[in-house]
Image (tube, rainbow, N blue to C red):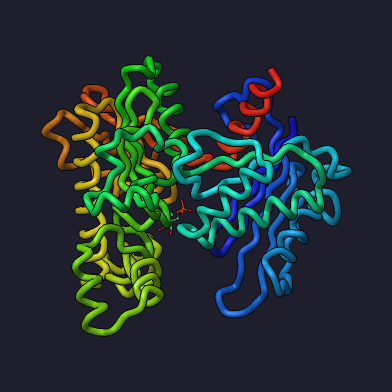
Amino acid sequence: MKVLVLNSGSSSQKCRLYQVAPGAPLDPPPALWRAEIEWAATDSSASLRIENASGVRYNERIEAKTRAAAVERMLRGLWEGAAPAVRAPSEIQAVGHRIVHGGAEFRAPALIDERVLQAIARHAEIAPLHNRSEIEGVRLVEKFIGAVPQVAVFDTAFHRTLPRPATVYPGPYAWLDEGIERYGFHGINHRYCAERAERMLGKNSADLRVVTCHLGNGCSLAAVHGGHSVDTTMGFTPLEGLMMGTRSGSVDPGILIHLARKHGYTPDDLDRILNRESGLLGLSGVSSDLREVLAAARQGHSRAQLAFDVFLHRLRAGIGWMLASLGGLDALVFTAGIGENSSDVRAGACEPFAFLGLRLDPVKNADPAGDADIAMADSSIRVLVIRAQEDWAIARECRRLLESSAG
Ligand code: AMP
């Protein structure tokens, strides 16, 4: 089955086409086609990059007044232009969409119909940038690809198994009636990594206790027991928890009250400060990219060093939190841009847990090849590096849902 995946971010739009075999195996095959749009920060231009399975590459700078116009251009590249993948749109048999916020009602992927779209639109109040562009993506597929089954795969769904004490905020009880509770995010990749860890360790998932560390531009941890998420660091929004590239993560809410009173900050000001001007960028003043922060720290830049130290401190504290929710640990998994590539972060994150018998192999940590176990043979806890495969995970979920609804 040819499954197209749409994955929209705040400033980018990724798209992949996969051939998904029956049973939707865990191992990702190479994509048949990949495309990415990146919007310029300063004007309405965007860059479109396309590559098909024959390795034909196509780059275009597009003047796109609207997001929809750019996405249309990208979709047409599937069957038109220099690097197509199919002869006609009708060859695409299903489309999967990453939906950031599924609220309380979606515990699993859902076949998209008007009712599902309305529910996604309701959650746009909490995740406005994402959910609206995701709905737009569904409409554009309807328009340009036609009547193909479309599936919503939610970033929040994996965490719907969190026990009540982990989801309820200790504010007024009325918050619960307003849907103010902890949802958690990055669930598509946390779930994929937990499944992959189970496969790599050859263990029965019913007993397996794993902490998955998704460390990219956004960072979150999940505590996974028996294949179910039992705790996670992100909450009502993707702002809670760990320090991130430009997001603060958790801060004392009293700071916000203080700032609002002292400087008259509006909700939009606080949104900008906490989501875009904090984290690695805010503290270091150098960059939101950990590579640049680390390079500056090595040159003696004290604010960059401080940013790295705080990042690590909060990551370690977060792992400790997840450990308490699991009551034990079989494997610690590192994934996404930082988790996969930064040996400094992995070593720093593991260090305080040596007292549990966790022993990282420094040679394997320095250069893990693909998905790898980088713990010493006698370590009481395995340490795994697992490449994030979010788009493949969405394609699998899509095929699984369509197979189960057909069968
Ligand atoms: P992602 O959101 O998963 O694409 O991750 C992107 C982030 O990964 C970048 O902003 C970098 O901070 C980080 N990253 C990528 N490569 C490295 C590396 N070699 N060392 C440290 N951080 C890295």
- Say which of 106 and 269 sits in front: 106
On the rendered image, what quadrant is the N terminus found in?
Answer: top right
Across and down, in percent, residue 120 comes to: 56, 50
Across and down, in percent, residue 393 comes to: 56, 36
Dividing the image into four equal quarters, which quarter contains ligand 1?
bottom left
- Say which of 95 and 302 sits in front: 95
The correct choice, above or below, for 18 with respect to 75 in the image is above
Q: How many marks?
A: 0
Tell whether 75 sits left or right of 246. right
Asked if one can make out residue 304 in the rendered structure from this viewpoint, the answer is yes
The correct choice, above or below, for 145 with respect to 288 in the image is above
> Hey, which quadrant is residue 386 in on the image?
top left
Across and down, in percent, residue 53 comes to: 74, 42
The residue at the point 41 percent across, 44 percent down is 340
Tell whether 135 sits left or right of 293. right
The correct choice, above or below, for 171 with respect to 357 in the image is below
Tell whether 292 sits left or right of 259. right
- Say which of 231 and 176 sits in front: 176
